[in-house]
Amino acid sequence: MRKNIGNDFALRGFVCYANCGVPLRSSWSTGKTRRYAYYLCQTKSCASYGKSIARDKIEGEIGALIKSLQPTKQLLTLAKAMLETLGNRPYHPAPDSAQTGLRRAHSI
Ligand SMILES: [Zn+2]
C-alpha cells in the first residue's frame, strides 16, 4: 500500500456520513490495470468499519448532492414561506377569544 496520498483525494477528511461521523481514511488499492482510490471508516464500533467506499463513487454522490443543494428560486420561495409561517404563528393565537368576548359583552 502506497502512502503518496495528496491532492488525489478531494474529500480527504470527509466523514463517515452513513454512520459514525468520524473522518474517513483515504487510501489506495492496486487493481490489475490501475490503482483505485477509496475511503475507509476506521471506527471499530461503526457499521461501516472496514468497508471501503470507492472514491469515484463517493465523490460522484457528493457532487450530485452539492448540485442538488444549490438554492433554486423555488426553494428560496418555499423557505421564505416557511419562515413567514413560523414567524406569524405567535401573532395569531388560536381563537381571538379576549376580543370576541369583549364584543359580545358589549352587544348584550
Ligand atoms: Zn463509520
Image: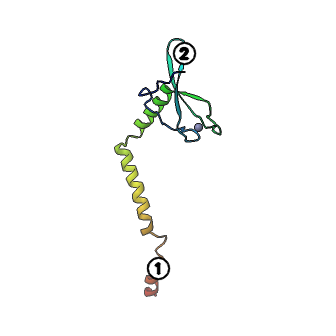
| Pointer 2 local density, CA inside 10 Å: few below 14, some 14–19, many at least 20 | few
The disc placed on residue 31 is 2
Question: Nearer the observer, disc 1 or disc 2?
Answer: 2
Q: Position of residue 98 (x, y in %)?
A: 46, 79
Q: How is the image coloured?
A: rainbow
Residue drawn 40% across the image and 51% down it: 79
Q: Which residue, as the protein is rendered here, is positioned at the far left?
A: 73
Give the residue type that dot 1 points to: Ala
| Pointer 1 local density, CA inside 10 Å: few below 14, some 14–19, many at least 20 | few
Looking at this view, is 78 or 46 the one in front? Answer: 46
Indicate which quadrant contains ligand 1: top right
Judge from the rendering whether residue 50 lies leftward or rightward of residue 54; answer left or right: right
Q: Secondary structure at mark 2?
A: loop
Q: Which residue is mark 1?
A: 98
Looking at this view, is 73 or 68 the one in front? Answer: 68
Rendered-image quadrant of the N terminus? top right
Q: Which residue, as the protein is rendered here, is positioned at the far front?
A: 3
